Amino acid sequence: MKKIFFPLFIILAIFLLAEPASAASSLTTRLKGRLLLQVEDRGRIWYVDPVGSQKHEVTFANALELFKKLSLGITNSDLNKIPIDPEAVSDQLDTDNDGFSDKSEVQNGYHPEVASNPDKRGNDKVSPYPALMNRLKGRLLLQVEDRGRIWYVDLDGKRWEVTWGNLMSLFTKLALGIKNTDLDEVGEWQTYHSNSYGFEFQFPTSYSIKPSSEYALYLINASDNASIFLRIDGQFNLEIIKNNYAPTGLADPPKKVILGKNTFYYYGPGGGGVNYPDQYFYNLNGQLLIISFDGPYDNSKTPTDRTKKMESKLLSTFKIFKAVDPTAGWQTYHFEGVVYKKGDSLISLDFKTGEKTNMILNNPDLIDFDLSEDNNWVARSFKESGFDGNSDITLYNMESSGVKRLTQKNDIASFNPKVSSANNKVLYVRRTYDSVTSQLSDGEIWSINLDGDIDSSKKLFSADIISNLATETCVSEEEKKSVKIGIYDVSPDGKSVAYWKKGIGAECSGLWQYPYYSNIDGTDFLTEKFKQQNIFVYENKNYNWDIYKINWQSDGSFVVGNQGPIPFSSESIYYYDASQNKKWGIIDAYKKDYRDYFSQVFLLDAHKLKDDTILLVYKLYFNQWDNSYYEQGKFVGEKYLWKKIKIGTDLVPNDLMTGKLIFASEGMDQLDRISDIKISDDDSSLLYVRKISDSQYGFYKFDIASGIDEKIDEFNEQIVFDL
C-alpha cells in the first residue's frame, strides 16, 4: 500500500492588525488539543491548538497550511518514546518484514518499522517516556527526519499518523462531538484596535480582516461568508439615521440598546421578504459609526440566533479612547515623570520631553521597584538563582543609565526597596535563608548607602515574634512562611519611614498587616503633643484606631487617614503642621456622624499647594440600600473625587459630597475600579490605574483643570507605577 506524506515546513505567522485576546474561556482550557466534531453542521472537524488556544477548522483545502503552522518538529528518537495506538496500524501489514504484523508488534510494545536484530536483542523495543507523552498530548508533530510525516498525539498520550488517505476519517474517529453553542465559546477572540478612529473591540477567530476601500473595517467568515463591516458616515443624528437606514416599512427611530458600557441604536428586519443585516449605530465623538452584521440568515429575513448572540458579545467588548496620530504614539503626554512596569519591562516616561525609555526589557525576574523623590534613581529587586525566593537589589541612574548592585549575599533575599535621596540611602527588606530547614526568616528592614558601601548597611527594624505561630490553626501554612514586615514609604526629608508588621488578626482571620510610623533612627515618629491631640492615632492594636494612610509633604507636614475601630470602620482625615507641631481635622468621623451621607471615606492622596491649600483625593463608599445613591437606575457603590481645601478648614460631610468627580469613576462597577491613584508632582493632574475588563487595565491621566481623562497605556495585568 502506497502512503502519501505531507512535505511540511514550520513557519511563523505574523498578525499585523489583530492580536489574541488575553484570556481563554474555561471551556477552551478543557478542550485544548482536542479534535471536535460539529454535530449540528455537517460534521465539520475542528482542532483546538493547545499552544495558541484557538480553534481551527480542518479541511482538505487547508490541511497543508494548517499543519505547517501548528506542527511541532520532533526527532525520530523522541518520537519513538511515544507509543503508537494499536488502532492506528493494520494487522494486514508487516512494514519491517520480520514476520509479525504491525498491529501485533505495537500491541506487544515493539516498533512496527524497525526489524528485530538477532545480534542486538531489543533494538526494536519501544521505551515509552511518560513525561514526554503527557507534555505532547493534543499536539501535532512533524517528523523532521522522515519526509515530514505528521502525527497526532491523543489525550491518552498515544500517536496516530495523519495522511491524505486517512485525514478526515481519522479525525472524525478521534473527535469529540460538540454543539454549535458550545463551539462558539471555544477559542480566544482577537482584538481589533484603531488608533486613527479611537475604538477597539474583540471578534471571533472564525472571522478575518479583509482589505476594503468602502469600509473602515471589513471582516468575513470564510466558512459561511457571513461578514461584519464598519464605516463612518457623517455626523451622528437619529433623525438622519431614521430617514436613511430604516428598513422597509419601518417609520420608527432605531431601538436604543445598551451593551457593555456603550449605547447603540439598532435596526433589524423590515418588510419585503429580503435579507436585512442587523445594523447598530453609535455616536463616535459626534460621528456616525455603523456596525453591520450580514448573515448567515434565518428564514431569509434576519441573521440567525447564533449570529445575534455573537453580536451582543462583540459589541459588549467595544471601547473608545482618544484617537491619536500613530506616528506620534503616546509621547505627547507631558508629566513630570513616571516609572511603570509593563509586562516584563520597566519603562520610564519623561513628562516634559515625552521620551520613553525601556530601563529593563523583557526580564520576567523583576520583582519590584521604587523611583526616588528627586527622580534621579530607581531601585529594583530581581529574582536570583540559588534558594527559592532569593533576590537582590540594583540601583539605576536615570541620567547616565548606569546600574549599580547594592546587595549580593548567598544566604539573604533582599527586596521591597525604597529610595531616600535626601539622605542618600535605600531602605529595603531582607530575609535570611536557613539551608538546614530551607526556610526564610520573618524579615527585617535595613538601609544601605546609594554608593553600595557594604559597611553602611544597618538594621533598622525587625518583624515581631508571633508566639505560638507554628501551632496557630487560624493561620494558613502559606501565611506562616510569608514575610512579616515591609516598607510603605520614606518621608521626603529621609528622616521617617512608614512600614508594616504582621500580627494575629481578630476572630480567627489569619495574619493582618498593622501600620507603624517611626523615625529612621528608631525613635518614635509622632511627638507627645501630637499624640495627646488624638489618643487614638498612635495605637497599633486590634479594635483600635490606626493610621492607614500617610501623605508626607516636602515641608515635613503630612496628611493622615485614620481607620476606625472594628466593627465600625469609620475614617477620619487629619493634617499635621510640622512647623507648629499642631494638627487639625479635615473630616473627623469620631465627632461627626456622616452616615446619612455616605458609609465611608478613604484618603487616597494629598498635596499641599503653594497657596496654603491642600489638594485632597479621596474615595466615598455608599450604602447600597439607600435609593439616593442610584443614578439612572444604576447603583454607584463608590466615587473617586478631588477637592481643594483651605488649611484650617474643618469639613462637614456634605463638603466631601461636593468634591469634583474624577471622570472615569462615574457609574463604576466591579470591573471598572481605580486600583491606584496619585497626584502628579506638578499638582496639575491625577495618574491612576483602572480595571477596564476581566483581563485588561488602563493607565490614565486626569487633567484637573480641564477635567479631561486620557489613556496613557493599556496592560494585560494590573500594573505598578511610581512618580
Image: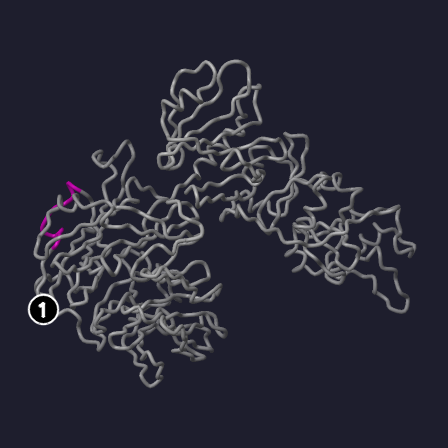
Relative to 162, is 285 on the left or the right? left
Return the residue at label 1. Answer: 579
- Tell me: residue 15, above or below residue 75: above
Task: Give the magenta part as a residue range.
Answer: 586-597
The amino acid pointed to by label 1 is Ser
Residue at the spot x=10%, y=70% of the render?
A: 528
Q: Dot 1 lies on which element?
A: loop
Relative to 34, is 599 on the left or the right? left
Residue 315 in the image: state x and y as whole percent: 45, 35
**Residue 273 found in image quarter:** top right
Residue 660 in the image: state x and y as whole percent: 20, 45
User: How would you rate the neighbour count of disc 1 (Cα within 10 Å): few for under 14, some for 14-19, many for 20 or more?
Assistant: few
Residue 232 in the image: state x and y as whole percent: 44, 33
Q: Indicate whether residue 106 is drawn in magenta.
A: no
Q: Indicate whether residue 596 is drawn in magenta.
A: yes
- Tell me: residue 635, above or below residue 431: above
Assign the magenta stretch its main secondary structure. loop
Residue at the spot x=8%, y=53% of the render?
A: 649
Relative to 609, is 273 on the left or the right? right
In the foreground, 651 or 374:
374
